[in-house]
Every structure is written in structure tokens, then in C-alpha cells.
Image (cartoon, grey):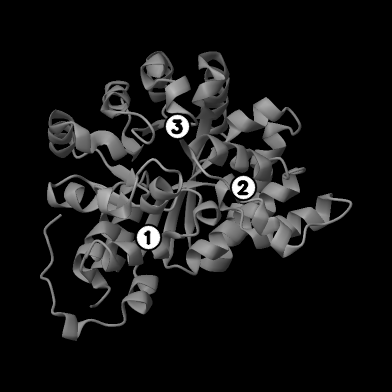
Amino acid sequence: MARARQISKSDQPDPETWLRGLPKAELHLHLEGSITPETLVELSKRNDPTPLTLAEARGVYSYHDFPSFLLCFKAVTTRLHTPADYELITYNMLRDLAQQGVRHAEVYISIGILYWQDRLDVDLVITAIERGRTRAEADFNISLLWIIDAVRHFGVEACARVFRKAADLQHLYPSIVGIGIGGNELLGPAHEFRELYQQAKAAGLRLTCHAGENTGPQSIWAAVNIGAERIGHALSAQDDPDLIEVLVDRQIPLELNITSNLRTGCCPSLEDHPVRRYFEEGLMVTLNSDDPPFFGANLLDEYLLAHRTFEFPLDQLRELAANSIEASFLPPERKLTLLAEVERYAL
């Protein structure tokens, strides 16, 4: 979109207040990764003989590298015991997003983990998150679409089961729109899923892919080649000028997660993160939070980080907010409504 006129610092409103009110979308957020320590305490009171204290709950979110982060993530998700627990975390997630000015979210739910744990009926869980979505949309003036996530390191057959389920569910629930693969890229290269992605596309599902988070640019190339419409992380694209050129030419949206990349060790420092370079080179950049309680930064924090550390002025952050709407899987009329809200939002 066209760059808006930059304004002088003396004319700017308070950045945090302004960014909180800025209408925006969250496109890379895991439902299970949205569980705050406070919500974990609620779950523990429901399900544990001796409930966690808030301090104990906060201690669950400790890790030191990417593999230990995945184990930490697992430790939180194993505390989801019933479909009603999923309804609770869905409602609380949308409440928290709305408080940050988020008007629309597209959220991953890991059906792959549900199948792997084999403790809960997937259909009952989907019914429960739909109850949470419906209540929260009405209460908080926010919309939500679901992306069904498979765990790539569980193997192709396990992911095929997830994608088949997604194809069936989309006919029952219009809020289910797409698929993706998360997990360890090193143990589940994207190119192995080419046929599954072709089948998902033929079934009418939208295609996302985590790529280039903890691997080189070849993983992003593979995601592009299997048809991913949006790419999560894309951190290592900076290492391949030819890939950058393709991403610019095709305007494939990138779901960037700055704090996530730092906290998992995938990016060694903030100074090394390519968000500013990507923006300046014309890539389709969006800001996202990934798993906020695990990383200590929600979506509003990501916008503030971009402003304070990467020196994005407010008008450029409004452009990123518009990108998030444009890159969404919303129908055109809803996109136009939200884009108009962003355009009207005054500096």
C-alpha cells in the first residue's frame, strides 16, 4: 500500500495509547500458546487435586532454547483436560486480544497434538472452541478464524490425518479456513508435505506454513514451492537475496514474530532481526505474537518494540496494521470494513 506521510515527533500522540487503539489483526497466534499463567491457574483449579499458585504457574513457562521451548509448550497443553477448558482459553484469548486493539485474529489450534495425546474427542473440542469464539466475538467486538495446525515432526501420515479432519470440519464450521504445519522444521521438512498441501488446497482450505524459524532459507523456498499463501517467521530469508526478491515480487505475507525469535534463540539479538530490512525492501510484513505468555510480549508489545527499537514511526505501524488485514483470510467485504477503520484512525 502507499506510504503515509510521516509526522514529526512533536505531533505524535502517546505511542502506547495510540497503538493500543490502532485496529489490527493477529495472524500468527497459537491457541494453546495464548494460555496466560492466570488462565493456567484457572485450569489448575478445575483439574488438579492441588491447584497451582500463580507463582508456580509462572514457573511452568521456563525454557532456555527452542527444543526446551517445545517441551515447555507441551507442559502447558497437557493441563487441558476437558473440552470446557478449550472454551475457557478461547474466550480468554479473545478478551486479551481485544484489550490490545485487535479487531480480527487467525489462530492456530493444534489438532495434531490432540490426536497425539489421544485424550479428548476432537469434535467435542471444536464444538467447545466455537462456543468460546461465539461468546467472545459478541462480548468484545472481535472476529476469529481458525487454522488447523499439524505437527510436522510427527510425520506425514499424522499430518495427513489432521488435514483430512480440517477438510471435513470446514463444512460444519465456516470459521475454519486453513491449515498449517508447526513444530520442528529440522524433523519435518516442508517439501515432504507437497502432496498434502495440494490436497488441502483442492478441498478449499487456505495454506500457511511455519518456515525459516530455526532452519535456513531452503525451508522457506520449500514453503513457497508447496503453495504456502502466508509464511510464519521467515527469519532466514535474510540470508538469500534471490529468495528476498521472490518474496517481494509475489508479495507473500510474512508473519513475523520478533520477540519469539529472540526468546527461542532463533535470532541471537534484536539488532540481528530483519524486520526493518524486510519492510524497507518491500516485503509484505505483518507483526504477530506467536505464544505471548511464553515470550513475555503480546501483540501490542510487538508494535511498541517495532516503534521503540526498530524506529518505525506511527504512520508506518499503521501501514503494518493494514498489512495484517490485507494478509488475512477474511472475505473481501470484511477486509474493506476493517481497512476503512485503519484508514480513519487518526494520528
93 relative to 127 in the view: left or right = left
Nearer to me, 136 or 220: 220
Instruction: Tell me the number on the disc at residue 119.
Output: none
Please give the name of the residue rendered at 61% of the width and 37% of the height, measured from the top-left corner. Answer: 71
Give the quadrant of residue 68: top right
- Kind of residue indicated by mark 2: Glu
Q: Which residue position is annotated with label 2?
A: 130
Mark 3 or mark 2, which is nearer the start of the sequence? Answer: 2
33 relative to 225 in the view: left or right = right
Q: Nearer the viewer, mark 1 or mark 3?
A: 1
From this view, report whether residue 258 is shown above or below residue 342. above
Looking at the picture, how far across and down is residue 4, in whole percent?
13, 66
Q: Which residue position is annotated with label 1?
A: 302
Instruction: Tell me the number on the disc at residue 180.
Output: 3
Give the quadrant of residue 313: bottom left
- Kind of residue indicated by mark 1: Glu
